[in-house]
Image: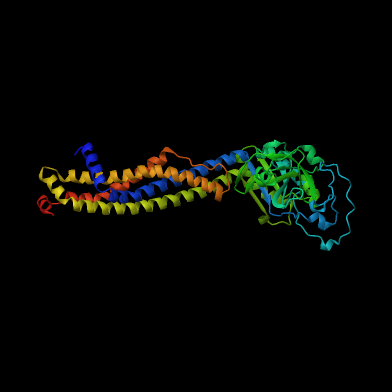
Amino acid sequence: MDILTLLESFFRELAVNPLRRGLSILGVVIGTAAVIASLAVIEGGREQLQGFIERLGVNLVFLEDRYEPQAGLAAQAGPAMDEAAPESGVAPGPDDGARPPAPAPAAVEPSILPQRPATLTPRDVDALARAFPAIRRIAPQMVLRTDVSRPGEKPMRAQVEGGTPDGAVIRNLRTARGRYLVADDVARAARVCVLGHGLASRLFPGGIADGSTLFMLGARWRVIGVLEPRGNLMGFDYDNRVIVPLAAAQERTGAKVINGLLIQARDTSSALRLRDELPAEILARLPDRNPEDFRVFCQDELLRQKEQTLDTFRLLAASIAAFSLVVSGIGIMNIMLVNVKERTREIGVWKAIGARDRDVLSYFLAESVLTCLLGGLFGVLLGIYFATSAAGFIAESITETEGWSPVFRPAFFLVAVGTASVVGLLSGIFPAMTASRLDPAEALRYE
């Protein structure tokens, strides 16, 4: 039986029993769609992860001190606020660093002052830069959470980072509007700030006007810039962060705290060595602290961890799709056995006019494979739709990361369609063997 006769017979059977054939290939359609959608969505996540790492910078090492200073520390220690709170209605003072002297601090018993652990100092940062020649740039940070608000508006919680201009260079931060911090801002402890794109959109829905101000840390701050959108991934959320000069953040909290370091190494191998050697150096300078207080990691490590997670999801999705295909294969086998039973007399006629056992075997195997191949082709189309919809849902509802889109590789389609064909072949072996072994005389007498 040639291929044209086989195709004609297959589509004729499909037209005679469309519901039966449709139900038999439904599992293949769903399984193939699951394979395509899961692989494309996970590959899209991998591409976005690599893109984020590239935007984050190259050869980076991050040191995180788990100690977080409290925004109210300065007030607890005694210095009076040198600017009116937003609700007071009193006009705040200048916001560009030229401020009147604050009143002398009130006497406070040392025993009631909040105790804080020893943290890194600017001298420690300079010493680390000298101790490790592989460090190209190093930027200290002071990170805390506090309330941020516009004048007269309800405050919202946000992460505030006290930083330096090198922090933008190391992380490839760029402003969509205005400018970033400059050395003079840090030197004067100027009360200026740069907003993340998402936070700026929530605080200023109508857009940021020149000279806009915010209230946080008990003071008034002038907005000088807005960052380009970066997204939220791996714990870095620059879209919802306020960046201020390090000296100004330390002044307003009353704590000379450095609880983070951004380090740019000369190359990837240097970054890995810094990750391993930096904790011992930090603990040598801060002997009262515990190793668990610090977390040191590099971007390559983050990339490997996330790729391992994606591989796990890829394996899980492939397992679910494989189970669906196995179930559909059992259904196709059942339909093929019914088909053989109904066409027993026809098989007897074939054999009576000269068809050999292998001809009958080949026909029913080919019919099973064609059934699964047709389901696989429909599954590919459905998988493309599912992948696009799922990626949009993940971006909006789960990761809160913009720009997640599925990535389709030619290998995905080959794997999906090839798997469907194999399922058809395996599902058709038993029915085809049953048909090929029928006795012609008995088959012709079958009613």
The front one of 52 and 374 is 374
Residue 134 seen in this snapshot: no
Residue 353: image location, x then y, percent: 10, 43
> Residue 178: x percent and y percent?
72, 36
Residue furthest to the bottom:
111
Q: Position of residue 118 (x, y in %)?
A: 76, 54
Q: Answer left or right for 100 relative to 320.
A: right
Please provide percent x and percent y for residue 402: 57, 43
Question: In the picture, which quadrant includes the N terminus?
Answer: top left
The residue lying toward the viewer, choosing from 223 and 103, is 223
Q: How many marks?
A: 0
Q: How is the image coloured?
A: rainbow
Q: Which quadrant does the C terminus fall into?
A: bottom left
**295 w.r.t. 181: above or below:** below
Task: Tell me the residue at 77%/37% (across/down).
Answer: 183
Q: What residue do we see at 64% from left, 46% from top?
A: 237
Q: Residue at x 71, y 46 (%)?
A: 242
Q: Is residue 178 visible?
A: yes
Relative side of 73 to 444, left or right: right
Looking at the picture, tell me which residue is in the foreground, 123 or 257.
Answer: 257
Residue 80 against residue 407 in the figure, above or below: below
